[in-house]
Amino acid sequence: MINRLYRLLQENLDPHKVLRDADILEGYSRDETPDMAAAPDILVRAENADDVSMTLKLCSEHKIPVTPRGAGTGVTGGALPVMQGVVLSLEKCNRILEIDRNNMVAVVEPGAVTGDIQKAALEQGLMYPPDPASLETCSIGGNVAEGAGGPRAVKYGTTKDYILGLEFVLPDGSLIQTGGKIVKNATGYNLAGILIGSEGTLAVITKIYLKLIPAPKVTLDILLPFDSLDQAIDAVHAVLMNRVIPAALEFMEQDAISLVSKHIQNTIPCADAGAHLLIQIDGNTEDQVLADLQTIVEAARINPDRMFVAQSPSQKERLWKARRSIRESIQAECGFFAAEDCVVPRAGIPQFVKDLKAYFHYKALRSVMFGHAGDGNVHIDILKDAIAYDEWKNMLPGIKREIYSRALACGGTITGEHGIGCLRKEYLPLALSSDAIDLSRRIKAAFDPGMILNPGKIFP
């Protein structure tokens, strides 16, 4: 069946877009999920919506699994073809079709890099706010499929808040448009909303309409050191209650600070602190931003002599280098690790982190925690260190269940921006009722009755 499909794809698409070379397929057998790989039988590098439509139509007719793939920066195995079949790569559908300054809308293809969209918008005095950590490499289609977030979510929201419309292809090859360059839309079901965060299991997105906003004229980045994480999170509450909404409000606990300080070349300011808050404030005037800074200093009860305010682009880079180098530092320290991203109510962060730290200490495990203090999204990385590989693999299910159970007990949930993918699907019943899962399955069946799109993901 695969051989027949390969011939049909070569006949109906440009042959150079349809590949079976083992070395090339190997490159599509991994994303950034630690310790996981799965190779496809066929790779299709689509270059337009017609390529996507024809590929899905033929795969649907032959009941061959299709795994959509963007830049491959996900960490839950969402872009891996665990059922083999076809990887449908959107990497060449990467054009920024339009930056419409008058309507403040960007029209882009799914393979466009998020950072490139931000730069193109900024050239027109506009801003696309969502900023996942991998923004210089991740694709906007992947951001939509995962419902990606980022540090600026506390003020500006996440990817879902900027989707005005989508063009997408159903598994039978049908091309559908919903929304567009319009702000309001009460016409029928919110199909775009259903697709956001669906992890490539319902349809393949081929065009995206993004809301843009005027870019702030002034930004300021500040690092606030604290003796403890409790003090840092208390400061978060105080800042927000004083009506300052920072563009970014990130935290790092002591183990994260120490690890990054060990591995990056630039010295981290206040590396001896028990916790850091990394804050970005923005506005239209310098006076407004400086007034917000003064409010933050007073609300957080911080000694101005202890805080670090970036006065130049290089100092700003120095501040954010630490936050953005955590994962890189973990990989340098330990090749194997588990990456989780639970969400808890903001005020619950210190207790959640402390309780997990105690649990990991009991298990003789090292951990690094950081994340988005403004929205309660806690990234939890557990290091394998010298544990034997088989023992590590046997430990992981119990560790994951413990992490998720503790997050849910705090009133949170099991993932805030990385998604379910392969790695968390067996834990979905911890977070969702059986009725909610059954409803999700019925939605899946309505979009994809042949069950060919990204099988083996989300559902237990």
Image (cartoon, rainbow, N blue to C red):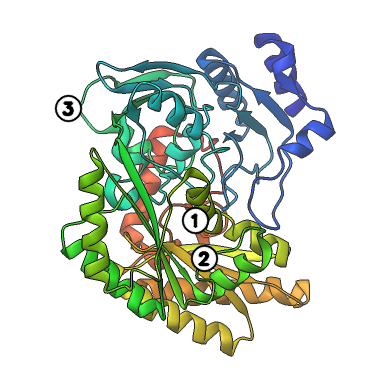
Quadrant in the picture for the N terminus: top right
Element under disc 2: loop
Give the CA distance from mark 2 to mark 3.
Answer: 45 Å
| Mark-to-mark CA distance, 1 and 2 | 8 Å
Q: Amino acid at mark 2?
A: Pro
**Residue beneath disc 3:** 184
Residue matched to label 1 = 319
- Badge 1 vs badge 2, beta-carbon distance below 8 Å: yes
Q: CA distance from mark 3 to mark 1?
A: 39 Å
Amino acid type, label 1 = Leu
Instruction: Please name which of the two marks, 2 or 3, marks the residue nearer to the observer.
Output: 2
Residue 347, position as x, y percentages in the image? 28, 73
Q: In the displayed orientation, state which residue is furthest to the bottom.
A: 362
Residue 389 vs 210, above or below: the answer is below
Counting residues from the start of the chain, the first of labels 3 and 1 encountered is 3
Identify the residue at image location x=39%, y=27%. Answer: 122
At x 51%, y 76%, the residue is: 254
Q: Kindly check if marks 2 and 3 are in contact, taking CB atoms under 8 A apart as contact.
A: no
Residue that mark 2 sits on: 269
- Identify the mark nearer the N-term, 2 or 3: 3
Answer with left or right where residue 105 lies relative to residue 43.
left
Q: Amino acid type of disc 3? A: Lys
Towards the viewer: 306 or 405: 306
Q: Secondary structure at mark 3?
A: loop
Where 5 falls versus 190 (above or below)?
above
The image position of residue 274, as x and y in percent, is 46, 78
Residue 156 falls in image quadrant: top left
Residue 107 against residue 128 in the figure, above or below: above
> Which of the marked residues, 1 or 2, is nearer the chain's N terminus?
2
**Which quadrant would residue 214 be assigned to in this image?**
top left
